[in-house]
Amino acid sequence: MMKKYRIIIFSFLLSLGFNIFLHHFDNKYTYNDYDALCGVVDYSSSSQELHFLTSQWEFYNHQLLTPEMIGDGQGVMTRYIDIGQFGGFELGNQDESPHGQATYRLRIYDKPQQVMTMQLPEIYSAYSLYVNGELLYKSGEVEKQNYQPFILSTDITFTTQECNEMIIQVSDYDHYYSGMIYPIAYGNNQSIHIYETIQTLIKGLQSFLPLIMGLICLISYLFVGRKARDGYFSLVCMSYLMYILYAIIHLLIKDKTLLWYRIEDVGYYLLIYFITLLIAYQYDYHIHRKQIICGLFIIVISLIVPTFFILNHVFVIYLLSYIGLFYKCLLSFIMIYIIMKNLYNQGGLFLNLLTCFSVFFIVSLHMDNKFWYEPIYLGWGTEIAGFCVITYFSVIMIHEKIELYKGYQFIQKSKEDIQDYIYDVAHDLKAPASALNGYIELLNSGIAKKQNKEDYLLKQMEKKIHILSKRVSLLQTLDLEKDFVLEKEYLSILSLINELKEKYDVHLIKKDLTLDVFGKDFYISVDKEKLNICLENILMNAIEYSDPHTTLVIETKENETCYEIIITNQGQTIPKKDLSLIWERGYTSKEGDHSGLGLSICQKIMKAHMGEIEVISDNHQTSFILKMIKK
């Protein structure tokens, strides 16, 4: 029983370890060598070029204070606060409104006269930045009567003094986040540029595969065949892109609306939902279409629609937070249930990998909610786990597409082989059919009657018809993709050749040819019918290309390694340039209706008998040497 749970336990521990690794080594909250204390941080002796202003900011709640006002002792500090510690100005008190206005203050000691850059992430939802008493940047309007949100990431450059005072006034009245949620990056121009470039490259790489595979599967689903997995996977890819592209979009598009943030949230919950459906499908866990549509409808109505219309209500903000957490837990439970239910049906590398990536995704979903984690380069655990799931299904689907393509290629080749097989059949039936035609010509000419050979010819015709019948039956069993299945028997080679000579007497008489047979008789184990096909093809060619009034010779030999049958004729030779081509299917030097398959068939038959055919053609003489290796 425990063996079945090993893969889940292993996946859980590995996923937990990876997320802990991310939280420790790719975390803005653990990156700094010096942290602030009581609103002051000293980087003058720091060896790091990049810092994140995460902790111990002075926080003045419900107050918009300028440097002059703070210098004059106006304003009352509420507390020291770490960035991201709270989601709004309510400071964790649900009886208070998260909306309103506040001021953040931090003093940084650094080497003077340096050109430094701050990367300001999204600050919700309007703010004014003062550095050393000077207003350096405004995003929207912070005054309540003129409030205008404007959320974007931007870089601010300034020249340092020995002590640098940062004051940020923030107002928010319509977002579900309020104030400073993400830490500010602080460093020289080069370090900030490298940081942003690496972030953009990683997001771009994470986006490329889902974009390409999502489009391919969407096209496949719409135009090739409506396979459910193609549809689910394309939806997973689109949801993933909606979820992760916000970082690049915020850098490239200076949008004053909250549209992209809402699209990010929509993508996040749809990603979880569609990954659940995709995992269920891969595990052959059937979910009815009505249930799928109903689940999607509930998510859209309860989570997505409110984010576009009624976020200015404090109650709705908290309600959406709890509903989102409920859906995340519910879908995680469904994924775990499906995995556990199919433990006994699992097998193979691909399903084990699916279990690993599914558990990784579930663990990352809930680890991302832990406080004091903000990724520097790699992204949130959910983003990485989602990319792993997409990569897994991409590999599976590409592998299947390749196999389908190979199958298509095999079918196309099979069609060609069938066509070749038809030519083979036609050619192989040609020899006995040609003999029958010769007998009929002799009967019609009256020569046979004068020589009292009518009965002989009729008997020969009967034999040829019998041969035709056997050849048809034989050729129906040939499989061109595999070796011939031989039905061997021991027989005398001279007896086989003499039977062949008797069959072709008529053809020899028509061209006034003589056929001499000599050599050693030996018994060999061969498939008689197939060897006859080979010998008849070569003999018919020899008769056709022999000069009239010449002698054909069939000689048998035996040596230490093989048996040989040599068929020699006098007449037209084969050009040297064609000697290597005569075994190729379709090659022929004959004019008219010839398929060029005879010698190809012969070579195939000899190879099936562990033999081969050699040819010597010179000095008005051609010899075909059939060799069969002794066993």
Image: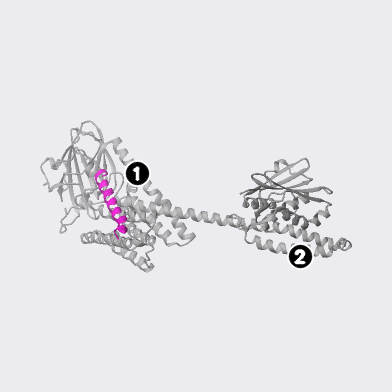
Whichever of callouts 1 and 2 sits on the residue coming sooner in the sequence is 1
Give the alpha-carbon distance from disc 1 to disc 2, as whole Å: 85 Å
Q: Where is residue 80 in the image (x, y as percent from the top left)?
A: 14, 46
Query: Depth check: 234 or 97 in front?
Result: 234
| Quarter residue 104 falls in | top left
Q: Can residue 448 be seen in this view?
A: yes
Q: In which quarter of the image is the N terminus?
A: bottom left
1 vs 2, front mark: 2
Q: Is residue 502 left or right of residue 227?
A: right
Q: Name the residue under label 2.
A: 462
Amino acid type, mark 2: Glu
Mark 1 surroundings within 10 Å by alpha-carbon count, few (fewer than 14), some (14 through 19), many (20 or more): some
Residue range in magenta is: 1-26
Residue in the picture at 17% in, 43% down: 105
Q: In this view, does 47 lie above or below 612?
A: above
Dot 2 falls on a residue whose secondary structure is: helix
Q: In this view, does 518 lie to the left or right of 347?
A: right
Q: Where is residue 572 in the image (x, y as percent from the top left)?
A: 78, 45
Mark 2 surroundings within 10 Å by alpha-carbon count, few (fewer than 14), some (14 through 19), many (20 or more): few
Q: Is residue 130 left or right of residue 236?
A: left
Q: In this view, does 539 lie to the left or right of 359?
A: right
Amino acid type, mark 1: Thr
| Quarter residue 409 falls in | bottom right
Which mark is drawn over residue 200? Answer: 1
Q: Is the magenta stretch mostly helix, strand or loop?
A: helix
Q: Where is residue 45 in the image (x, y as percent from the top left)?
A: 19, 32
Residue 534 highlighted magenta (yes or no):
no
Query: Depth check: 383 or 65 in front?
Result: 383
Residue 21 highlighted magenta (yes or no):
yes
Q: Position of residue 408 (x, y in %)?
A: 54, 56
